[in-house]
Amino acid sequence: MPRCKIHNVGFYKPEAKAIYSMSLNRQQNKLAISRCDASIEIWNLDHLPFIEKSIVPTLDNFSVEGLCWIHDRLFSVGLHGFLVEYNLYGVTVKNKWSITGEAGTCLDSHNNRIAVGTEQGYVNIFQTIHNGVEFEKFLDKQEGRVVCLKFNSSGEFIVAGSVNAIRIWNVKTGHAIHKMILGRSETKKDTIVWCLEVMTDFTIFSGDSRGVLTLWDGKIGAQIESYQSHHADITAICVDTNECSIYAAGVDPLISNYEKVKVGSNFRWVKSIQRKIHEHDVRTMVIHKGRLYSAGLDSYLVCSYYPPKTLIKYAPILQTPCIQVTSSTSRRILLRYSNYLEVWSLSRTQNVPSNFKGIVEPEERPKKLLTLQKLGKNWAEEDEAESIVCASISSNGKWIFLGSCTGFRLYSFELAKTKPKLTKIEDLDDSNVPCVQAAFNDKRNQLIIALNSGKLIVYDLENNDPFIFQRIEVENGQLSDTVSLLTVSTCGKYLVIADAKSNITVFKYTKDGYSFLVKLPKYQASPTALSVNSTTGCLVVAYADYKVWEYSLQNKHLTGLSKKLESTPGWKVRTHTIRSITFDSKQSIFLHDDSSIIVIVREVSGAKEVEKKLKKEQSMHNGFGEDVLQIRSISKYKHLVHLGNVAEDEFVAVEVNPLSILKNLPPAFAQKTFGSK
């Protein structure tokens, strides 16, 4: 195991954002989730789940009450009164259409139709077309707001839940054909139907504010059965694909499961296992490939399944990269939050012997140098901080980049006598174009920005007067989706971009600028992290199925790293994807996921010095060559967000304490337990 210093940073404390709704695209294995700040995350479920894309909220799209997929198109509805479609390539709002009935409260889709429920009781029907959406009709107005709605399997009927009643609408005529009245737990207290599920045989499940799970016959509009499954509101129910199992949860976070069993000649729903995996309200659940995904006010996305009994929690951390560390000369760290940035100085430690083990006392504490945000006008013409899409800081700490959905800004940053000085670069060309990723090439004194259109812009930062040095057109075949990863080698020679569809393209810097070098072989899984080892000239890529590739950029072929890792003791597939990759002076590879740092140590085999030298030369030329690999793992972290190197053998590990997430949550549902007062 190589010896190194590790700064454990614990002052990164992102705010917990409750998850309000989820929508699953089963054909593409994509899960869209919306949070309380109207941000949307697209999770890729093909292998290990990870955030593939993030759509930040805009100042006019400030609410997401529901999500739905139609093929590969994503729609939402919110309190602003619009049906919104998103551009998943540019990760921004594509178009929006006004709905009748003021605020939108819920939506559902069937084939090419979208039904939207509203605050005033209208159900709007929209028809999707090639380049947008057309309004078709709205159904008869009902009393009170539409809280939830679902199409039946044929799309001929819509089931809508509201206060004290469930209505079944005929889509063709626009009239309600059944109205089912719910009971009340108290005389003067309304019963709110929070959630619905409709089976293929038109059996309807409803969850309400009494904590009652009710079965209805949609053909005749009558109640079949009811279960007092919870002690408080049921806000989420979901049914598996074969319609033999249903899950319910809500303000009482206990997840109850009911199984369909045959009793004589009939079928009944019988209570099965219960899952206690949340402490706060559960707002939404989906089942995919036998795995239950649940989420709510605690902001965690939780995956649970059986057998074997497994529970995996995914913390509310922004899409990678959200942390960046500068060089040993400036010793600063950039922390990205949802709508602002922070720049801190790293602590300096005492000099200790090279063989020292233990905790070193810092000579000076970390200090916050800067908080930066971009303001815009909201719907009320008031100043409000815009959401940040990406951010970066140069290695010398003199340049800070901030990108939002309305454009980007570049700042020069100086620290004179411990007093920070921030200067905005005015009249920056193309600064009003939205971007998705950015990185500095510190060797060439350049800034590379990936626009949401797929193009790359290179700015020259010489003489503190940035100008556009080059525009890089990404040709067809090089990328087919949004740029999800962008990195520049520390030597300044290589620029690497990747998308979620496993297209990885490398550009090389020459005197005429960046030119296409090579495209890596396409793999079945999406890349989650990549980095270039400038010493060996090799690109290391980590994929969502925990596969790690090493590609020699000099020889343009894969090395034997991946096959050797699979056969190396200690290498195993984990529950979270790899978030970042870095290297030390001995060419060991440092990877990390949510809870562990994995170190791939290379040791040259053979007794003779000549053999060692030959193998070392081959290793330096082809990556790992004939080296023997050893795996070392440090599993002491909870939510490890970033691991980066300040110097050759000095690293920074940024961890989010789970208690910092939970302490800002509202009180959980209180229940009396046996033996407690």
Image: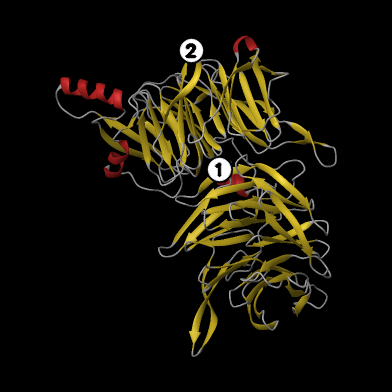
Q: Quadrant of the N terminus?
A: top left
**What is the crowding at mark 1: few (fewer than 14 residues within 10 Å), some, or many (at least 20)?**
some
Can residue 295 be seen in the rendering of this structure?
no
- Which residue lies at the image location 65% right of the left edge and 69% below the top edge? 155
- Indicate whether 129 appears above or below 5: below
| Residue 541 spot, x, y in % from top left | 41, 36
| Residue 653 spot, x, y in % from top left | 49, 33
Residue type highlighted by circle 1: Asn
- Farthest residue to the top: give it: 463
- Which residue matches tag 2? 511
- Farthest residue to the bottom: give it: 264
**Sequence order check: which comes first, mark 2 or mark 1?**
2
- Looking at this view, is 129 or 500 the one in front? 129
- Which residue lies at the image location 55% right of the left edge and 43% below the top edge? 657
- Looking at this view, is 344 or 299 the one in front? 299
- Which residue lies at the image location 35% right of the left edge and 47% below the top edge? 572
Kindly check if marks 2 and 1 are in contact, taking CB atoms under 8 A apart as contact.
no
Residue 607, picture quadrant: top left
| Residue 216 spot, x, y in % from top left | 66, 79
- Which residue matches tag 1? 657
Foreground mark, 2 or 1, reads 2
- Looking at this view, is 657 or 218 the one in front? 218
| Residue 39 spot, x, y in % from top left | 66, 46
Q: Is residue 317 left or right of residue 625?
A: right
**What is the crowding at mark 2: few (fewer than 14 residues within 10 Å), some, or many (at least 20)?**
few
